[in-house]
Image (tube, grey):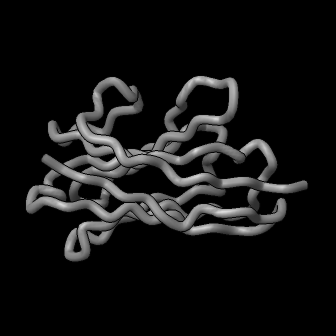
Amino acid sequence: QVQLVESGGGLEQAGGSLRLSCAASGRVFSTYTMGWFRQAPGKEREFVAAIDWTGRITRYADSVKGRFTVSRDNAKSTVYLQIISLKPEDTAVYYCAAEKDGLVRITSSRYDYWGQGTQVTVSS
């Protein structure tokens, strides 16, 4: 079992930046692919970014490429999502998820564990 706890969300102005963190419990964190998803009000949950267990392979949604950077520190069992040049359309609850098969997937249903989410609100 893996427990995930996100932090770092908040209210920011457009053009600002945030770094989200996701702390994981469990010894197998270092073998899991970690993903970030977001869900805006009235919309479906969407893929944002993912990183494999080595940290060398990453994937991003087209809408966030160049502004979002996913990284991980296996020694700290933590995955990060750095966001720059925030836009109002980035407003959403951001979730981290763990995928135990080690594949870098973009489909939420393929992820095995989820955090509770952290709210990001971007004002214009």
Residue 74 screen position, x and y as percent? 22, 69
Is 116 placed above or below 14 here? above
| Residue depicted at 29% across the width and 27% down the height | 110
The percent position of residue 4, horizontal first and vertical second, equals: 31, 54
Relative side of 43 to 23, left or right:
right
Q: Give the mark count.
A: 0
- In the image, residue 40 lies at what x, y percent? 66, 35
Task: Determine whether 105 is above or below 16 in the image.
Answer: above
Residue under the point 65% across and 25% down: 43
Q: Nearer the viewer, residue 14 or 57?
A: 14
Above or below 31: residue 71: below
31 left or right of 83? left
In the depicted structure, whether residue 116 falls above or below residue 77? above
Residue placed furthest toward the left: 27
Q: Is residue 30 among the parts visible in the rendering? A: no
Residue ranking furthest to the right: 124
In x, y percent, where is residue 23?
A: 32, 64
The quadrant in which the C terminus is found is bottom right
Q: Is residue 101 visible?
A: yes
Residue shown at the point (45%, 58%) measured from the top left: 70
Image-based side of 30 in relation to 72, left or right: left
Extreme residue toward the front, this view: 116
